[in-house]
Amino acid sequence: MTAQKQGEAPASSKPQPSHVATSARKSWIRRGPVEIVLEQIGKQERKVNEMREDLKKEERELQKLQQAKKVLEAV
């Protein structure tokens, strides 16, 4: 027997749909290694671009704080 969480009902008590919408799922297409690598490159490019945008925001915030520091040190 497997342990179940207190709030969960047994798996057998879940109602099973009598029909599954096959049009809602995309058919599985086998991809070659080239497509996989190209997809990984695209994901990495998006991630790097997002990180660059975040870095620009952080640099602007740092610049504001450094200006405030100069004002406080001048006083």
Image (cartoon, helix red, strand yellow):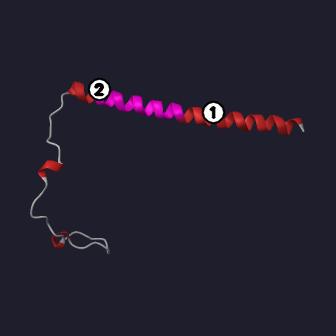
Residue 17 position, x and y percent, is 13, 64
Sequence order check: which comes first, mark 2 or mark 1? 2
The quadrant in which residue 11 appears is bottom left
- Say few, some or many: other residues with alpha carbon within 10 Å of mark 2 (under 14 / 14 to 19 / 20 or more): few
Residue 27 position, x and y percent, is 14, 42
The magenta stretch spans which residues?
39-53
Question: Which residue lies at the image location 41% right of the left edge and 32% below the top edge?
Answer: 46
Residue 64 position, x and y percent, is 71, 36
Residue 59: give its label.
1
In which quadrant of the rendered image does the N terminus lie?
bottom left
Residue 40 position, x and y percent, is 32, 30
- Residue 30 lies in the magenta stretch: no
Q: Which residue was labeled with disc 2?
A: 38
The residue type indicated by label 1 comes to Glu
Question: Which residue lies at the image location 23% right of the left edge and 27% below the top edge?
Answer: 35
In which quadrant of the rendered image does the C terminus lie?
top right
The quadrant in which residue 8 appears is bottom left
Q: In front here: 48 or 23?
A: 23
Whether 57 is drawn above or below 38: the answer is below
Whether 64 is drawn above or below 2: the answer is above
Q: Is residue 60 left or right of residue 41?
A: right
- Residue 43 lies in the magenta stretch: yes
Q: Is residue 40 left or right of residue 72?
A: left
Q: Going by the picture, which residue comes out furthest to the left? A: 18
The residue type indicated by label 2 comes to Leu
Q: Is residue 5 left or right of residue 26?
A: right
- Say few, some or many: other residues with alpha carbon within 10 Å of mark 1 (under 14 / 14 to 19 / 20 or more): few
Q: In front here: 67 or 32?
A: 67
